[in-house]
Image (cartoon, rainbow, N blue to C red):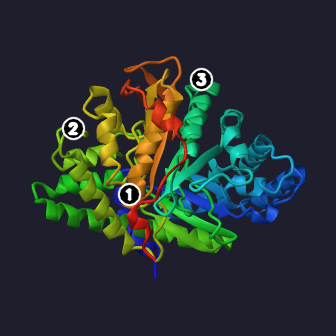
Amino acid sequence: MLNARDILETITMIQDEHLDVRTITMGISLLDCCHSDVDVMCNRVYDKITRYAKDLVRTGEEIEKEFGIPIINKRISVTPAAMILAACEDKDAVKLAKTLERAAVTCGVNFLGGFSALVQKGFGPGDRELIEAIPEALSVTDHICSSVNIGSTKAGINMDAVGLMGKVVRKSAELTADRDCIGPAKLVVFCNAPEDNPFMAGAFHGAGEPDCVINVGVSGPGVVRAALAKAGDCDLTAVADLIKKTAFKITRMGQLVASEASRRLGVPFGIVDLSLAPTPAIGDSVAHILEEMGLECCGCHGTTAALALLNDAVKKGGVMASSHVGGLSGAFIPVTEDAGMIDAARCGCLTLNKLEAMTAVCSVGLDMINIPGDTPAEVISAIIADEAAIGMVNSKTTAVRVIPAIGKQVGEELSFGGLLGSGPVMPLSTYSPAKFISRGGRIPAPMQSLKN
């Protein structure tokens, strides 16, 4: 049984090494809010979210004070909005987004995710309407996050959706150019999206989830780095073992917070996502863990191997500490959100090609990467297609969150503030994939999808 004594040994980690619970995320099903009248549907959505999540922030703050564990964000994820929009005669997706924003403000949460569509095998009712509304929806809201799943190992890759998402990402940047192009920083394009992910911007409450559930995402890159620094010149087997033991301690704390939040809110406990989620703060970086292993700079040769070791050890250690592990669970490599990644990108050691290779062995994918403002939509689509192919073939979750820096070129910077951080505009290949993207259709599922 977990209790307060179980986390006493983590006090130093919390005080000195940036250990925190990154998020308590309440997942809420909106399937029973469907109605043919969009206004009735929106009223039902607002009422249900505010009824279920009214005490979420207060409960998180109470747990934080009682146990001395920093809980950085309190968030909500909802049923993919395209599903409930499908029942409406007037599919006004922006009106729904504004309703979700109003609910998020009322509940006092940091973000609300689930302005989403799942189109890996084609477009259903409501999907196109929602996807085409994403740029406007993200430009008129502050707390809403959006995601679109365009591929899976079972279904292949919907290249029509890939082509559309390149345009959506670019338009989102254009509509928020006066705010450092913040729109696409709240938009993720997935392959193999998990239904229980508590992390933004890709969180949504899957159709197979309970009516309401509590999911927790932990963090702690600084803790892992500090442990490695104390270990000295041990071999890589010992490094992996040390990371496993550290991940166990980090995840145990997350399990305690999740169980306590579940009990106090009267909501079932879902999962602990044991991902190492970095921040722009010095000492809280996945890149610095890799450098502690012996790399001169993140992005040099050997980076992919070091990241593979880290990701695997985190999973092995964390899975033993929680009754239910889920979400993404591994090591995140968002460029602008990681102080070490930012430095590596600025000096030119970390490139987009190297990041793509790294995504084959870590959680998520090409995340929070600033690209030149004049990048054509078809190039963005091709980046999405490349990353989706890695996820599809390797039966893992991959994603793309890139930000076209409107009016800026390579070497200039965008700054988003807070956890989203800042970073340089990174160069892309100037050769065009336009003809390939314009073909549309579907890339068939790989052979490994036939497992039945």
Residue assigned mark 3: 177
Q: What residue type is labelled 3?
A: Ala
Residue at horizontal 20%, vertical 48%?
292
Residue 47 placement, left or right of 444? right
Q: Can residue 49 be seen in this view?
A: yes
Compared across the picture, whether 368 is left or right of 352 comes to right
Which tag, 3 or 2, sits closer to the chain's start? Answer: 3
Q: 171 and 348: which one is in front?
A: 171
Few, some or many residues within 10 Å of mark 2 (<14, 14–19, 20+): many
Name the residue beneath numbered marker 2.
297
How far apart are the alpha carbons under marks 1 and 2? 29 Å
Identify residue type, mark 2: Cys
**Taking 59 as reference, is 386 left or right?**
left
Badge 1 density bin: few <14, some 14–19, many ≥20, Cα 10 Å: some
Q: Position of residue 389 (x, y in %)?
A: 41, 50
Where residue 61 sits: x, y (%)? Answer: 60, 57
- Give the SS element for disc 1: helix
Is the residue 75 above or below the residue 343 in the image?
below
Separation (CA) of disc 3 from disc 2: 32 Å
Identify the residue under disc 1.
393
Front label number (1 vs 2): 1
